[in-house]
Image (tube, rainbow, N blue to C red):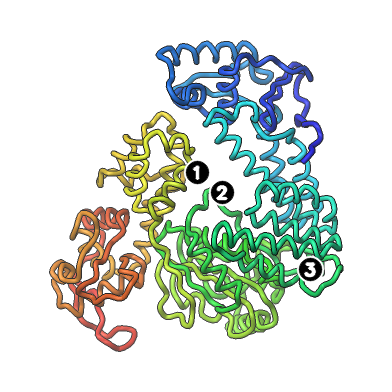
Amino acid sequence: MTRPPVRTGSAGAAGAVHFSLLGPLTARRDGRELPLGPRKQRLVLATLLSRPNTPVAVDVLTDAVWPDDPPRTARKNLQVYISAARALLGPAGDGGADRLVHGCGGYQLRIAESELDTLRFGALARAGRAAAERGDVAGAARLLREALDLWEGPPLHDLRDSAGVAEEADRLEARCLTVYEDWAEAEIELGRAAVAVDGLRDLVERHPLRERLRAAWMNSLHQSGRQAEALAVYDDYRQLMARELGLEPSPAMAGLYRSMLGRGREARRPAVSRETTCPVALPAGTGAFTGRREELRDLLDVLGGGEERVVVVSGPGGAGKSALAVRAAQLLADPFPDGRVHVRVRREDGTARGRAEILAELGRWCGVAEARAEAPGPVAGAEVPASAGALAALAEAWQEWQARHRALVVLDDVPDEACVRGLLPRSGKCAVMVTARGQLPGLAPVHRIALPALADGEALELLGKLIGAGRLRTDPGAALRIVRACGGLPLAVEVSGMRLAVLRHLPLAEYADRLDDPSAALDELVAGDVSVRHRIASGWRDLADGDRWVLGRLAGLAEDGCFTLDRATVALGCGERAAIRAVESLIDAGAVTSPAGEVTAHAALYEVPRLLCLFAREQAATGEQGAGALGPVAGRTGAPAVALSPG
């Protein structure tokens, strides 16, 4: 794509320096390009600018400049390059403060948003997405186009022979692709597809397997009256997927293709404006979403194909249920043209919201109930029915709406079956994704997807996204120890990555040693206000007293959290039938994992996930896991069950 000359944002004070990474590395003062010195000095500056306002460890700078065999004088040479750069760039801002400073975490380059094109690009992209979420499609298109206009060519293309710089350049290109897709979709929605056709064609040629790009290209061709070309784009993609990956296009892509068949040369335009359609109210996806390919494919196949109306995604806290559900909902636009909505079923403090509150929010989103607020928003602005009659009327209106529409609803973090009964569709083509820590066995018929721990490869991929692939390669053995100490729990791996991204000086092996220590692991898994212990504690509070007592006993059986039924019987001091019921109650709650295939209860090897095991042992040590003995009582089905009998 040919792009206009870079714009540097706000003008700033006279003499201010403006840096550019979106193309060759450049620095300009008062419109005049500055000489940035020899190549190694440019590599140092590019690495610092890639991490603006963040300390960059000396080791990271060394790897960028001398990736294979740094000389003995590497540290002294770096000091020379830093000194030269400091003299060239001068002070930061109007206060005369040092622009390039050294602290315990390394060297930090202080820079304002208006002084660096990547910071300006990120700010414009965020503003564009926010405008789109508000329904201001024209404003979103304008802001996203302004972000794209900052690009002068492939980022840092003159320094890509350095692995560290190349990694940053690849990350920037990926961000550009996403913003280009957002911009193209906004233009298509505005009926201005022709402005995006050529650019989309060029990008698809360079990224042939990127489905969202190809879908936008198909839409732009179709809206421009070039239906035959649009259908040919899909056919080429289908053949490429089969040849390269042995896969079919996603259900969403296939649905887009089917929707174009038989429309002749009619342009594909939105039938109604965004303001009059049912909403797309989904949280922003995480850039670190990794793995879960089989589970995602399962969700897309089942929901995109219309085979099931209700899917339950279960797994322990921090397993990535919400991220997976949101990712799937984002990819299922075409099968659900009447809207895709995400609703949390718990409040911020972890308590369950009432059905009236949830129905009021659903009614507000789909227009079957009046709301106090003028614009859609969280539950705070929704009317809550004041009487049983009003609640019943709203529930019936919600069922009638579902029967007439084809929408997807994500009911996130469901505590139990009672919270969602009456919300699930009885007829029609609406679908609901339910995420829950427990398996909600009382809901039927539903399609179930249980999220296991991440495989080692997926967990390492997630860690690498957060700390950088280059750092991961410095000690792959320690990285593997880290993800295994996290038990393959996505939240724990993500928190580890966030900590290590800040603690650039910390060797991976040292952090792995900390996580290997059972008494310290949960203390290490905290990043800012994100705490793995707090997430596990929330799930712990969901358990019945008897289940907590059982879990505390089972967690003490083996160092690795694994146990057999015979060992559980001894640890619980009960008969075989009571032990089976106790273990299966914890499986239902998502606190114990069992084999995926069929196997007898005696032959099965059960497991308490490592971090939950550590937490349960902590609770047992403090006497907060509950106390009591197991005995048979009447369960929910009337059959003998396990309950906690006081003292």
The disc placed on residue 287 is 2
Name the residue carrying label 3: 276
Mark 3 or mark 2: which is in front? 2
Q: Residue at x 30, y 83 (%)?
A: 635
Q: Is residue 345 above or below residue 131?
A: below
Q: Earlier in the sequence, mark 3 or mark 2?
A: 3
Name the residue carrying label 1: 465
Residue 58: image location, x then y, percent: 46, 22
What is the quadrant of the N terminus in the image?
Answer: top right
Q: Earlier in the sequence, mark 3 or mark 1?
A: 3
Q: Is residue 183 above or below residue 588?
A: above
Q: Disc 3 versus disc 1: distance between alpha carbons?
A: 39 Å
Q: Are marks 3 and 1 in contact (CB under 8 Å)?
A: no
In the picture, measured across the screen, residue 453 lies left or right of residue 82, that is: left
Residue 508: image location, x then y, percent: 36, 36
In the picture, measured across the screen, residue 415 lies left or right of residue 586, that is: right
Q: Disc 2 versus disc 1: distance between alpha carbons?
A: 9 Å
